[in-house]
């Protein structure tokens, strides 16, 4: 299984690289984690599907990967969660966006996969 990838604003791991990863891996997963020097109490750690529009929202400075937030990406949710735990102990939340393509239709607030309704 492939390891997680950290996009932290460094060379080859900055915003254009992160956006390219999202485009190439729409079935992947992204965990927003705070930079180690960011106060954790104001920074949610949120798991998104790569296809979620909220995974493309910039931080306070308009950047996606920066000195305030990092992105841990993986093709597997479990690998993305493990990768996020390497950088923070803040409890993970699961995105509940109801935007078109948002995560709210994919999983519950607890991270359980929603059952598809049969017509």
Image (cartoon, rainbow, N blue to C red):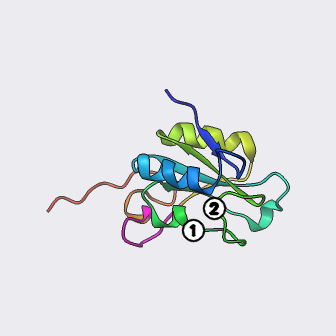
Q: Residues within 10 Å of mark 2 (few under 14, many from 20)?
A: many
Taking depth in this image into account, of 60 and 18 the one nearest to the observer is 18
Above or below 42: residue 113: above
Tell me the CA gap for discs 2 and 1: 7 Å
Taking depth in this image into account, of 87 and 21 the one nearest to the observer is 21
Q: Residue under circle 2?
A: 64
Residue 69 part of the magenta-drawn span: no
Residue 54 falls left or right of residue 39 = left
Residue 44 place in picture, x, y as percent: 68, 63
Q: Residue at x 50, y 48 (%)?
A: 21
Residue 100 place in picture, x, y as percent: 36, 70
Q: Residue at x 72, y 39 (%)?
A: 86
Circles 2 and 1, Cβ within 8 Å, touching? The answer is yes
Residue 9 falls left or right of residue 76 = right
- Which of the two labelled residues, at mark 2 and mark 1, occupies the earlier sequence position? 1
Q: Residue under circle 1?
A: 57
Above or below 8: residue 53: below
Taking depth in this image into account, of 95 and 110 the one nearest to the observer is 95
Q: Quadrant of residue 106?
A: bottom left
Q: Quadrant of residue 16?
A: bottom right
Residue 79 falls left or right of residue 87 = left
Q: Residues within 10 Å of mark 1 (few under 14, many from 20)?
A: few
Above or below 46: residue 82: above
> Magenta-highlighted stretch: main secondary structure?
loop
Residue 107 place in picture, x, y as percent: 42, 56
Residue 45 place in picture, x, y as percent: 66, 57
First to last magenta residue range? 95-103
Q: Determine the secondary structure under disc 2.
A: loop
Count numbered badges in the picture: 2
Q: Residue at x 70, y 50 (%)?
A: 8
Note whether residue 111 is visible: no
């Amino acid at each position: 299984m492939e390891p997680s990838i950290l996009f932290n604003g460094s060379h080859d791991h900055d915003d254009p690289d992160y956006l390219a990863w999202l485009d190439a891996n729409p079935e992947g997963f992204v965990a927003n984690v705070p930079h180690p020097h960011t106060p954790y109490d104001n920074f949610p750690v949120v798991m998104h599907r790569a296809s979620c529009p909220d995974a493309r929202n910039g931080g306070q400075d308009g950047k996606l990967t920066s000195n305030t937030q990092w992105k841990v990406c993986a093709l597997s949710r479990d690998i993305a969660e493990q990768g996020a735990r390497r950088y923070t102990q803040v409890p993970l939340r699961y995105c509940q966006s109801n935007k078109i393509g948002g995560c709210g239709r994919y999983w519950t607030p607890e991270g359980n996969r929603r059952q598809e309704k049969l017509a």
